Amino acid sequence: MKSTPIITILLSALLALFAGVASASEPSSVHSKHPLSYYSLIMDPAPDAVERDLGQECVTELRKYFNQGKDFADERLIKSAKRVSEYQFKSGENVGTFYHHSGAEGVRDAGECHDFSPMLEYVRRDGQGRTGPLDIYVAEDPHSSASFGQYQVRFKLKPEALVTTRSRQWIEGANRMRRKLMFCEVSETFLHLVLEENGIALFDYFVRPNGKWFQLIRMDDVESFEPGVQGQR
């Protein structure tokens, strides 16, 4: 009878150990849930532009890394970002609306269906015959990209969506993540995976005279998507 407490303690310890092993294999909560996110496409065995850009050895290693319940979240990087509602945009506005122009009828059709997934699939699965970055380009000003085509679509981001700009801090952060792996290099696609893992929806990468241009990284934070009129808000 005196051994009962000892057995109970041992059983509790074993249960806690098994629970820890189970939780370690569960997906991290920081991973993007969108089916066309970098994370989702890396975990999908079907070949796509993300795998082609990163390389098969790198993607295989990333799958193993993520399957162990790991992620690339870094509190220092997250703290360096700002919400769309707080970011200092060139226009002085913080409404979170961004514009994309194209001559492709598929973009027009996507806008009319209020579904940007076909656009993103074309970029991240097919890759448009290019190597990274595999993102949708948007502009803060509706006129700055109008020369790229007659069809305009508008993306509205959630106020809490995070935005950041290219900086030494992010490059160094991506290098810290890369050192956890053997077969990956810090390409644009790898950097954008790190951005996505840290909750970045919008990457400020370029400045035109009439406004900034961005890349949409984490698509979970798109609040609405709709057709627009060329050059108009």
Image (cartoon, rainbow, N blue to C red):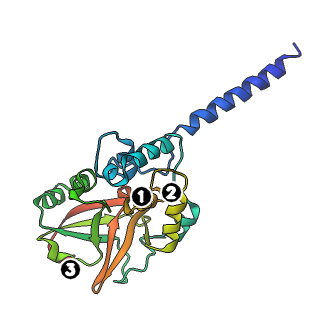
Using the image, tell me which numbered label, if any, was put on residue 143.
Answer: 3
Amino acid carrying mark 3 in the image: His
Circles 2 and 3, Cβ within 8 Å, touching? The answer is no
Residue name at image x 34 percent, y 49 percent: 51
Mark 1 or 3 closer to N-term?
3
Q: Examine the rendered structure and indicate whether residue 220 appears above or below residue 26.
A: below
* Camera-side residue of 147 and 179: 179
Q: CA distance from mark 1 to mark 2?
A: 8 Å
Question: Horizontal and vertical percent for residue 215?
Answer: 33, 67
Q: Quadrant of the N terminus?
A: top right
Number of dots carrying numbers: 3
Q: Secondary structure at mark 2?
A: helix
Q: Along the horizontal axis of the image, is 224 left or right of 232?
A: right
Q: Residues within 10 Å of mark 2 (few under 14, many from 20)?
A: some
Circles 1 and 2, Cβ within 8 Å, touching? The answer is yes
Q: Along the horizontal axis of the image, is 96 left or right of 150?
A: right
Using the image, tell me which numbered label, if any, was put on residue 68.
Answer: none
Question: Horizontal and vertical percent for residue 188?
Answer: 38, 63
Q: Examine the rendered structure and indicate whether residue 218 appears above or below residue 3.
A: below
Toward the right, the furthest residue is 2
Amino acid carrying mark 1 in the image: Phe
Q: CA distance from mark 2 to mark 3?
A: 38 Å
Question: Horizontal and vertical percent for residue 26?
Answer: 52, 39
Mark 1 or 2 closer to N-term?
2
Residue bearing the label numbered 2: 178
Image-quadrant location for residue 14: top right
Using the image, tell me which numbered label, if any, was put on residue 190.
Answer: 1
Q: Examine the rendered structure and indicate whether residue 64 appears above or below residue 204.
A: above
* Camera-side residue of 169 and 136: 169
Q: Along the horizontal axis of the image, is 224 left or right of 188?
A: left
